[in-house]
Amino acid sequence: MIPHQTSTRRVRGAVLLEVVIALFIFVAGGLTVLAVMDRSAAAMIRVRELEIAADLARSAMSRLEMGEASLETLDGPVPEWRDETDGGFEDDLPPPSLWNLEVTTEPSEFTGLTRVTVRAFRLESVGSERESVSFSLTQLVRLSAGARDDFGAEDPLNAGVERGGGAP
């Protein structure tokens, strides 16, 4: 063998090794970027779901404050949104929603006000018990007389106090 051919083979082998190492570094960097992008996308989806849960809880609380809805009508599954402005008419019911509301009340120390907690949560799938996201909102609300009577007229903190807010 001629010394020139041996050095040429070594150079070619070194170049090949450099190319393989560079390719490995490039693929590893690309996989790292893809993993970071995947985590970012999952985090954005979770934040979006938390935003929806917060909006549902705030909307339910507002409807209670306005007297537009009762505790019983809000508690349970949230109907799927249907865009009524598209001009089409469908006889079918919307698909079941994975979003639910849980409304609880308890008496407060303030006359005429009730501590209302609205919890909006999303189930992982239809029929599942596991929640993927949850948001709770607690607020003092002046409920209508019918709603106050539903959770108990025997409010120990407000016992003997007239509905008008007068002293016993």
Image (spheres, rainbow, N blue to C red):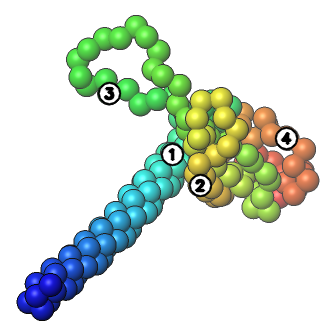
State the separation of the CA atoms marked 3 and 4.
38 Å
Circle 3: residue type: Asp
Quadrant for residue 109, please give it.
bottom right
- Relative to 5, does residue 162 appear above or below in the rendering? above
Image quadrant containing the N terminus: bottom left
Q: Can residue 141 be seen in this view?
A: no
Observer-nearest of 35 and 78: 35
Quadrant for residue 165, please give it.
bottom right
Q: Is mark 1 on a helix, strand or loop?
A: helix
Q: Is residue 154 left or right of residue 32?
A: right
Q: Which mark is residue 83?
A: 3
Q: Name the residue under label 1.
A: 56
Circle 4: residue type: Gly
Q: What element carries label 4?
A: loop
At horizontal 65% and vertical 29% (from top left) the residue drawn is: 127
Q: Between label 4 and label 1, give the one nearer the viewer.
A: 1
State the separation of the CA atoms marked 2 and 4.
26 Å
Observer-nearest of 129 and 1: 1
- How would you rate the neighbour count of disc 4 (Cα within 10 Å): few for under 14, some for 14-19, many for 20 or more? few
The picture places residue 44, in percent across and down from the top left corner, at 40, 59
At horizontal 85% and vertical 40% (from top left) the residue drawn is: 152
Number of residue marks: 4
State the separation of the CA atoms marked 1 and 3.
17 Å
Q: Is residue 4 left or right of residue 165?
A: left
State the separation of the CA atoms marked 4 and 1.
26 Å
- How would you rate the neighbour count of disc 1 (Cα within 10 Å): few for under 14, some for 14-19, many for 20 or more? many
- How would you rate the neighbour count of disc 3 (Cα within 10 Å): few for under 14, some for 14-19, many for 20 or more? few
Q: Residue 135 carries which label?
A: 2
Q: Which mark is residue 152?
A: 4
Circle 2: residue type: Phe
Observer-nearest of 11 and 24: 11
Q: Can residue 133 be seen in this view?
A: yes
